[in-house]
Image (cartoon, rainbow, N blue to C red):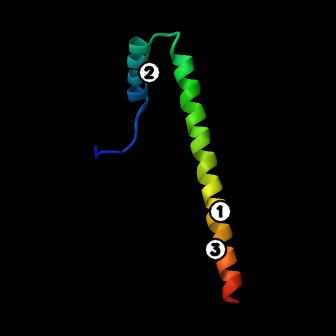
């Protein structure tokens, strides 16, 4: 199996069991919320950067005409 071919169900279960053992059941929801917040902020930042980039391209095209 090549590297990066995807994660199967058993690998996900193994990761969750190890996380449960290492962090404990009380800390996992907090960690999940933090990861979710971080992913949401990253997605928003990428969308904002993409919008700014497309606006710059439109302004440059208007100046050339």
Contact flag, marks 3 and 2 (Cβ < 8 Å): no
Q: Quadrant of the N terminus?
A: top left
Q: Which residue is rendered at x = 56% and y = 38% of the image?
A: 39
3 versus 23 height, above or below: below
Mark in front: 2 vs 1: 1
Residue 58: x, y in percent? 68, 75
Residue that numbered label 3 is attached to: 57
Q: Could you classify mark 3 by the number of other residues whose Cα lies within 10 Å: few (under 14), some (14-19), or many (20 or more)? A: few
Toward the viewer: 13 or 23? 23
Q: Is residue 47 left or right of residue 10?
A: right
Residue that numbered label 2 is attached to: 16
Toward the viewer: 46 or 25? 46
The span from disc 2 to disc 1 (Cα, nearest Å) is: 38 Å
Residue that numbered label 1 is attached to: 52
37 versus 58 height, above or below: above
Q: Is residue 3 left or right of residue 49?
A: left
Q: Could you classify mark 2 by the number of other residues whose Cα lies within 10 Å: few (under 14), some (14-19), or many (20 or more)? A: few
Q: Could you classify mark 1 by the number of other residues whose Cα lies within 10 Å: few (under 14), some (14-19), or many (20 or more)? A: few
Q: Quadrant of residue 35?
A: top right
Residue 46: x, y in percent? 59, 52
The span from disc 3 to disc 2 (Cα, nearest Å) is: 44 Å
Element at label 2? helix
Counting residues from the start of the chain, the first of labels 2 and 1 encountered is 2
Q: Which residue is rendered at x = 51% and y = 17% of the image?
A: 28
Residue 15: x, y in percent? 40, 24
Element at label 1? helix
63 versus 57 height, above or below: below
The span from disc 3 to disc 1 (Cα, nearest Å) is: 9 Å
Residue 34: x, y in percent? 56, 27
Q: Quadrant of the C terminus?
A: bottom right
Mark in front: 3 vs 2: 3
Counting residues from the start of the chain, the first of labels 3 and 2 encountered is 2
């Amino acid at each position: 199996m090549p590297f990066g071919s995807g994660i199967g169900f058993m690998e996900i279960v193994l990761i969750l069991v190890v996380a449960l053992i290492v962090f404990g059941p009380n800390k996992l929801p907090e960690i999940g919320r933090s990861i979710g917040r971080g992913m949401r902020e990253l997605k928003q930042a990428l969308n904002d950067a993409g919008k700014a980039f497309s606006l710059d391209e439109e302004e440059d095209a208007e100046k050339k005409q």
